[in-house]
Image: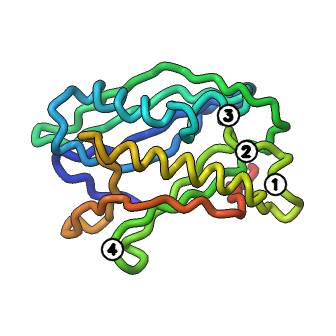
Amino acid sequence: MTVNIPLGFAQGIFVFTLSGKQEPMAVTMGWDLTESVTSVDADAQAIYNQLTSANRPFAAGSMNSSYQFEGVELQKATATGPIVGSHRSPVVGLGTNQLLPPNCAVLVKKNTARGGRKGRGRMFVPMAVIGEGFVDQLGTLTAANVIQQQNAWQAFLGATASMLQKPVLFHADPLIDPDPITSFTVTNLISTQRRRLR
């Protein structure tokens, strides 16, 4: 689905790589940069710093050693066209858990104050943060791991409260303004990507 990105807002892309996999993986999140007075590169670095701090979603201690969080890219909408900025400083995971297949992901819901389906989004986070031992044969995450991931995302969101860059949920309808993300919900069932083989 194509989303509408108003002027002063940006699409954020969190980039991962996995050893042995040629294509990178990406997680997207909208950002309100209307209050920011820094460059788009500096905006990307500010977001990166909060994602990779201790006990945050993409801290080295939270990820498997086969995964690498490459950095943050931003595509900001302006009156003269998009401006692209990025901050690349690879973070290599320190964990040694047995990996799940790369078509598995953690489903994280983006919640806002808007009611109904329009007020909810989601993102699929690579299994860099969860090893095979934390998932049972039905694809259910252990309660302890769900709590750990939930706390990491909420800590990240809490840190953005004092930043000039604010996470938002975009909409396809250009008449609906982006909604601030008020919380994240980590689901206890892993998601999988189905790809047709040719």
Residue 25 position, x and y percent, is 58, 38
Disc with the residue nearer the chain's start (1 vs 2): 2
Q: What residue lies at 49% left-to-right and 59% top-to-bottom?
A: 184
For label 2, count other residues whose C-alpha is less than 10 Å away and answer few (under 14), some (14-19) or many (20+): many
Judging depth in this view, the residue of 80 and 140 nearest the camera is 140
**Disc 2 marks which amino acid?**
Ile
Task: Look at mark 1 in the image and give the residue it sits on.
Answer: 135
Kindly indicate whether the residue at mark 2 contacts the one at mark 1 (C-beta within 8 angstroms). yes
Q: What residue lies at 54% left-to-right and 62% top-to-bottom?
A: 185
Q: Quadrant of residue 183?
A: bottom left
Task: Look at mark 2 in the image and give the residue it sits on.
Answer: 130
Left or right of 88? Residue 96 is right
Q: Quadrant of residue 81?
A: top left
Secondary structure at badge 4 equals loop
Task: Look at mark 3 in the image and give the residue it sits on.
Answer: 63
Residue 45 position, x and y percent, is 36, 27
Q: CA distance from mark 2 to mark 3?
A: 7 Å
**Disc 3 marks which amino acid?**
Met
Mark carried by residue 154: none
